[in-house]
């Protein structure tokens, strides 16, 4: 259902508030450059520091600006099942096409707890749902066997697999077949994951290089493996640079260097260290981005 180059879009701030004008411009930048779907309020969108009103407003702005040209998959995850249901209900009312639900963080549920959490959200809200497995941030790993159980629920349609493990992604694909779509959650392994059967990527790098990320996915889907491999290797250095500090600090800094929005982040995130910023500037110059 959701496939291709999907951007986990940044949430631009200005003087502490959401910069609605810049957010709308970023949406246009994505659509003009071939992005297949947009995820507001994901990790890259700093959902963890948005209050409820801001969270709903960011989703609303993106939906309004997109005007049904591409799907909008709203980040609605929480470590409280009740809260995740509420956020997902709000996203549905606003007109989202789907929801991205991160595994509950901090409280470290068992695999049975994870299954029951996602099952409860899916049963409560009739909206296509994308599981989001990122154990490096949440402290819990959604195992392939649990994904296979969840894939039996009709409106759980995909998983953003961000373990960085081709082995785990392959196990999910082997166990689930065509019952659930797998999306890469890491730009640096999109190509090999698609070779295993993934349908695309939920990308950080697409915030600054949407045309190239879309071209990689499109080349693969067209059967042009040589071009897809070339783009994979071309994008590797800039994709790695997006994680020289905690996401989304590097990508927001890059967006700012391109003049598209401010690099403002909210505490506990801090502005990029000058040494790392210098490295990022050098890499962006290599790519002709600045």
Image: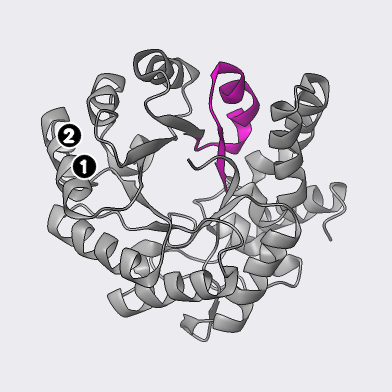
Where is residue 33 shown, x and y percent of the image?
Answer: 75, 56
Residue under numbered circle 1: 118
Q: Is residue 133 visible?
A: no
Observer-nearest of 251 and 45: 45
Give the magenta range.
184-203
Where is residue 35 shown, x and y percent of the image?
Answer: 66, 52
User: In the rendered view, does 138 fall on the left or right side of 227?
Assistant: left
| Residue at 43%, 19% in the rendered image | 173
Taking 186 as reference, is 62 above or below it?
below
Q: Which mark is residue 115?
A: 2
| Residue at 26%, 53% in the rendered image | 126
Disc 2, SS: helix
Q: Quadrant of residue 193?
A: top right
Where is residue 151 shown, x and y percent of the image?
Answer: 29, 29
Taking 76 as reference, is 220 above or below it?
above
Q: Is residue 164 visible?
A: yes
Tell me if label 2 and label 1 are in contact, CB under 8 Å: yes
Q: How many marks?
A: 2
Q: How far apart are the two marked residues, 2 and 1, measured between alpha carbons?
A: 5 Å
Q: Residue furthest bottom?
A: 15
Quadrant holding the C terminus: bottom right
- Tell whether position 122 is magenta: no
Taking 15 as reference, is 206 above or below it?
above
Q: 10 Å neighbourhood of mark 1: few (<14), some, or many (≥20)?
A: many
Q: 10 Å neighbourhood of mark 2: few (<14), some, or many (≥20)?
A: some
Q: Quadrant of residue 213?
A: top right
Taking 101 as reference, is 198 above or below it?
above
| Residue at 51%, 52% in the rendered image | 247
Q: Which mark is residue 3?
A: none
Disc 1, SS: helix
């Amino acid at each position: 259902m959701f496939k291709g180059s999907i951007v986990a879009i940044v949430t631009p701030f200005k003087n502490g508030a959401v910069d609605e004008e810049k957010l709308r411009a970023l949406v246009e930048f994505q659509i003009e450059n071939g992005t297949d779907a947009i995820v507001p309020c994901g990790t890259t969108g700093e959902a963890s520091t948005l209050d409820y009103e801001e969270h709903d407003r960011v989703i609303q702005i993106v939906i309004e600006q997109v005007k049904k040209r591409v799907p909008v998959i709203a980040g609605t995850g929480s470590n409280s099942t009740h809260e995740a249901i509420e956020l997902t209900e709000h996203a549905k009312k606003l007109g989202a096409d789907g929801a991205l639900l991160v595994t509950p963080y901090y409280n470290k549920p068992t695999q049975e707890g994870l299954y029951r959490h996602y099952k409860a959200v899916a049963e409560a809200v009739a909206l296509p749902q994308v599981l989001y497995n990122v154990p490096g941030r949440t402290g819990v790993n959604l195992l392939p066997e649990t994904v296979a159980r969840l894939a039996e629920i009709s409106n759980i349609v995909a998983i953003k697999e961000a373990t960085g493990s081709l082995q785990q992604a392959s196990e999910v694909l082997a166990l689930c077949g065509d019952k659930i779509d797998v999306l890469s959650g890491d730009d640096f392994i999109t190509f090999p994951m698609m070779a295993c059967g993934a349908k695309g990527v939920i990308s950080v790098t697409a915030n600054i290089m949407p045309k190239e990320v879309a071209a990689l996915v499109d080349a693969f889907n067209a059967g042009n493996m040589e071009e897809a491999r070339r783009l994979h290797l071309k994008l590797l250095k800039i994709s790695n640079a997006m994680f020289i500090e905690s996401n989304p600090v590097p990508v927001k800094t890059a967006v700012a260097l391109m003049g598209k929005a401010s690099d403002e982040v909210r505490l506990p995130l801090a502005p990029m260290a000058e040494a790392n910023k210098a490295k990022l500037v050098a890499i962006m110059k290599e790519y002709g981005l600045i």
